[in-house]
Image: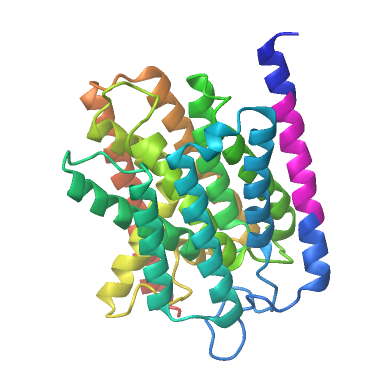
Amino acid sequence: MSSTAIYTLFFVFFFFTVAAFSLLINSILLRFVKTLGTKNQPGATVRWSSQTKPAIGGLSLFIIFFISFSAYSTVFDARDVFENMRIIGLLAAGTIGFLIGLTDDAYNTKPLLKFLAQVVCGIVLVSSGSQIEFFGNEYADALLTVVWTVGIMNSINMLDNMDGIAASVSSFVMIAAIGCLLSVGGYTSVDFTVILGVLAALAGFLFFNWHPSSMYMGDTGSQFLGTVLAYIGIHYCWNAEGITDGAGAWYGLAALVSVFLMPLIDTTVVTVNRLRRGQSPFVGGRDHTTHHMYYFGLTDGQVALIYCILSLVAVSGYFILINFVSAVAYSVIALYIAAFFAALAFFFILVEKNQKRRGYVQ
């Protein structure tokens, strides 16, 4: 049997084993934990659902995150983990994201504390070699990396506003990274095993999070996932690593708006509209693009399905970009960026029309 066949069997076995373990651990946690991260308590941020449900999904994601590193170290070379600063940085930043999320779910911490922890996650990624290369200036790129990390961590947190949304969108981002690694023969890398493991964990979590859900991922999950997705965005979008040599900033930007289409659109629409109303973009509300789809008459499940379809289309565009488009095809790159702004404009118009029709819903 060839080495490729052996690796394929291992990863298939690994994925389904981890997915089954995610189902098991979430069912166990659901049985014993009923109040962790329930934001429906007095004085806390009101969730979309009127029911109080435990926000414990992030625990299984983080556990499997570490199991994935252990699995790689056992099957491949442990030195690729423990002697690789970039991977150690991912481990450290992911752990910080998990801990601040867990603290927030347990104690409903101040937004400033969460923000500072997000900044630290960005600094850890920069200092360990995961830095965006966009401006060509080390300090400007380091600042952009921190802003990107903070932004995507908040974006995934904001997307965790309706059953199945954050987990589904995050899954498609990871599918994009896995597809990229497969296209360049990177299936023996640490990144591949870890991303595949977290994707399998999300599959197990979605069993409980799809509408009607029995649990949320909470800040424990969204802050951890946001850190991992920020890392993915740096290496497989911004820097287009392993895709096209010397791809350049605009190629990476086109990849970014494809893979992160829905998080970028929802965060931008919500942030701009809240600032226009004189509100803080960091305070929760029922004014997300998902909510406005519901106000137009769609069910929670239909909204999640639409987000999945849009994410699938976006990721398909990413695969076309990295496999068939040259880094110097500026007209095609411009088309990708223009398509993003067209989609953004569509959602702005949708929200604006809905607000005029119904009035703003808090």
107 w.r.t. 142: above or below: below
Location of residue 360 by image quarter: bottom left
Q: Nearer the viewer, residue 192 or 280?
A: 192
Q: Is residue 331 left or right of residue 273?
A: left
Quadrant of the image containing the N terminus: top right
201 w.r.t. 336: above or below: below
Q: Nearer the viewer, residue 347 or 279?
A: 279
Q: Position of residue 245 (x, y in %)?
A: 31, 21
Quadrant of the image containing the C terminus: bottom left
Q: Is residue 39 magenta?
A: no
Magenta highlight: main SS: helix
The boundaries of the magenta stretch are: 10-24
Q: Residue furthest bottom?
A: 42
Q: Is residue 43 left or right of residue 111?
A: right
Q: How is the image coloured?
A: rainbow
Location of residue 321 by image quarter: top left
Q: Is residue 17 magenta?
A: yes
Q: Residue at point 43% right, 45% down?
A: 231
Q: Position of residue 233 (x, y in %)?
A: 40, 43
Q: Position of residue 264 (x, y in %)?
A: 38, 53
Q: Residue at point 55% right, 62% down?
A: 98
Q: Residue at point 37% right, 29% down?
A: 241
